[in-house]
Image: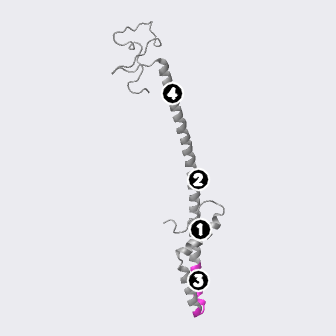
């Protein structure tokens, strides 16, 4: 609590060598001389109490600032958890939608494969070429499709919607 070499000296040892520590001398009536080399500082009771009071006030202010910082961190943690849950729900919903779309594609491909043989020869070629063109989706087209559908899906929410390749 006290800096090194600055602790209060007991009343018996306060008289020093060659002086008698009699009961008639009190701590307040004793004259305070400047400290000699190698001699510790001697504080009065009032000085010690004042120093303890200052140190207590300093520690109280430090405690208050740490408490405020802790409350701020707790609120930030709560906000981060809320965002995490929101992103998790979005991710889960997008994953379900992706599997749903993959199943739709698989079923539509099976339907096309069953119907194409019943078409006339020139129509079969046109349909097969159209199917191949549909499979050649560029990343720009995909990002624009995802951006439009994401904007419609998000509505008025404030989170940004990322395109398919914006994450790289």
Q: Position of residue 150 (x, y in %)?
A: 61, 67
Residue identifier under label 4: 54
In the image shown, does 153 or 144 lie closer to the viewer? Answer: 144
Mark 4 or 2, nearer chain start: 4
SS of the residue under disc 2: helix
SS of the residue under disc 3: helix
- Badges 4 and 3: C-beta atoms under 8 Å apart? no
- Mark 1 is surrounded, within 10 Å at the Cα level, by few (under 14), some (14 to 19) or many (20 or more) other residues, namely few
Q: Which mark is residue 97?
A: 1
Identify the coloring.
one colour
**Residue ID at (56%, 75%):** 141
Q: Main secondary structure of the magenta part?
A: helix
Q: Position of residue 144 (x, y in %)?
A: 58, 72
Q: Which residues are magenta?
A: 108-122
Mark 3 or 1, nearer chain start: 1
**Residue ID at (65%, 67%):** 152
Q: Quadrant of the N terminus?
A: top left
Cα separation, mark 3 vs mark 2, equals 45 Å
Residue identifier under label 3: 112
């Amino acid at each position: 609590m006290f800096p090194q070499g600055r602790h209060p000296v007991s009343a018996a040892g306060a008289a020093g060598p060659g002086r008698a520590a009699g009961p008639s001398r009190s701590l307040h009536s004793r004259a305070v001389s400047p400290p000699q080399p190698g001699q510790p500082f001697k504080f009065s009771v009032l000085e010690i109490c004042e120093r303890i009071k200052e140190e207590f006030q300093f520690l109280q202010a430090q405690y208050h600032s740490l408490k405020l910082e802790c409350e701020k961190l707790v609120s930030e943690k709560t906000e981060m958890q809320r965002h995490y849950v929101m992103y998790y729900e979005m991710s889960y919903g997008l994953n379900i939608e992706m599997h749903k779309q993959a199943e739709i594609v698989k079923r539509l491909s099976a339907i096309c494969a069953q119907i194409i043989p019943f078409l006339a020869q020139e129509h079969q070629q046109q349909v097969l070429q159209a199917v191949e063109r549909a499979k050649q989706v560029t990343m720009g087209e995909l990002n624009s499709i995802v951006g439009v559908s994401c904007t419609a899906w998000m509505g008025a929410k404030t989170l940004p919607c990322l395109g398919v390749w914006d994450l790289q």
